[in-house]
Amino acid sequence: MKKKLIKPFAILLAVFLGLLEVGWRFFNMVVCCKRGEHKKERKKWFELSHIRENHPRNGYARVYNESKAWCLEQKMQDCYIKSIDGLKLHALYLPAEDAKRIVILSHGYRGSRFGTLSFMAKYLHEHQCDVLFIEHRCCGDSEGKYITFGAKEQWDVQQWAVYVSERNKEKLPIYLYGQSMGAAAVLMASGHTLPAEVKGLIADCGFQSMEGQMRDMAANWFHLHHIPLLLIELDWFCSLLAGFHMKDADTAEAMKKDTRPLLFFHGEKDTYVYPNNSFQNYMLCRAEKELVIIPGARHLCCAYVDPELYQHKMMEFFEKYD
């Protein structure tokens, strides 16, 4: 009798451990920080064709590299804050001559201070905007072991806004400008108390929720249309190891609470964060808002595809709400 029970038990245990291993690998791939010696592993696991195809380096390499080089040449001030969970977070501040406003830049998933935002950072600085390049937890010189898809980054963005406000002696208007996950973090932060000088938010290709993004990636990248067990495992690891639940990384409630004007951008051909995310955020937002869809633009490429329209919309937004 015992022998008969041992075999099915062993099979169930093997299946359980196999599923747990899959969940762990997925968590390690998308949430765990990858730095230094893990660089090769990151390329092996995560540099999929969708990522390469959507990046501005694909088609706009010259402009991308030139603006990044420009940022590296500038003399900037190191800034630091401590997150609500005790991490030392880093940013770089670039003042402009006769500044009219301050723009806080919030980069995307596994991004960097001088990555895809460099192109618009250069433009903003040349148009009398002080710029703060924040480095999200687990990126650049900021501490952290886990990327939380906005669940904790939203509080970091809020704290950076407070940091800038406290040093804003001239009471210049402040704007929060994010791309991709950085845009989602900005949208989530809009549901919290922000300094009075924060006049508006700009969200370029932001997603609505971590869970929705995981579902989209599974369905459209790997043709896995039903992944409830994987999501349960991912959420379990996020809670146990990284201190958050996927439901914490969701813009819906913030969009219902936000009172500040919002300017949304999204690329029509974005296959990394699908345009329906910005449509959903736009529909949920109860504040003054505008959604600009850039024809032919992929993920993070709106400003590169039609810089004239993109920059015009942004300056128009500033002038309206300064």
Image (cartoon, helix red, strand yellow):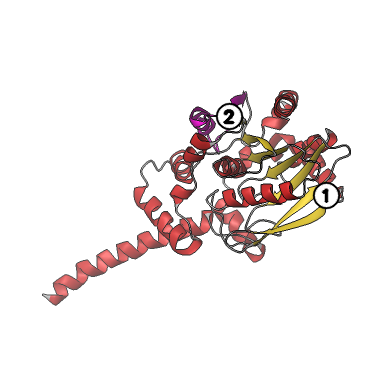
Looking at the image, tell me whether mark 2 or mark 1 is earlier in sequence order: 1
Q: In this picture, is 35 found above or below 124?
A: below
Residue 72: mark: 1
Pair 2/1: label in front: 1
Q: Nearer the viewer, residue 59 or 137?
A: 137
- In the rendered image, residue 242 lying in the magenta stretch gets the answer no
In the image: residue 29, left or right of residue 79: left
Q: Is residue 177 visible?
A: yes
Which image quadrant is residue 62 in?
top right
The N terminus, quarter of image: bottom left
Q: In this picture, is 115 found above or below 244?
A: above
The C terminus, quarter of image: top right
Q: Is residue 113 visible?
A: no
Look at the numbered disc 1 and give the secondary structure of its residue: helix
Question: Residue 155 appears at what percent x and percent y?
Answer: 58, 51
Q: Residue at x 40, y 43 (%)?
A: 224
Q: Nearer the viewer, residue 151 or 194?
A: 194
Residue at label 2?
A: 269
Which residues make up the magenta segment? 266-294
Q: Residues within 10 Å of mark 1 (few under 14, many from 20)?
A: few
Marks 2 and 1 in Cβ contact (< 8 Å): no
Question: Residue 70 appears at what percent x and percent y?
Answer: 84, 44
Residue 41: mark: none
Q: Residue furthest bottom?
A: 2
Real-space Cα separation, disc 2 to disc 1, in angstroms: 30 Å
Instruction: Specify the amino acid type for callout 2.
Output: Lys
Q: Residue at x 43, y 55 (%)?
A: 234
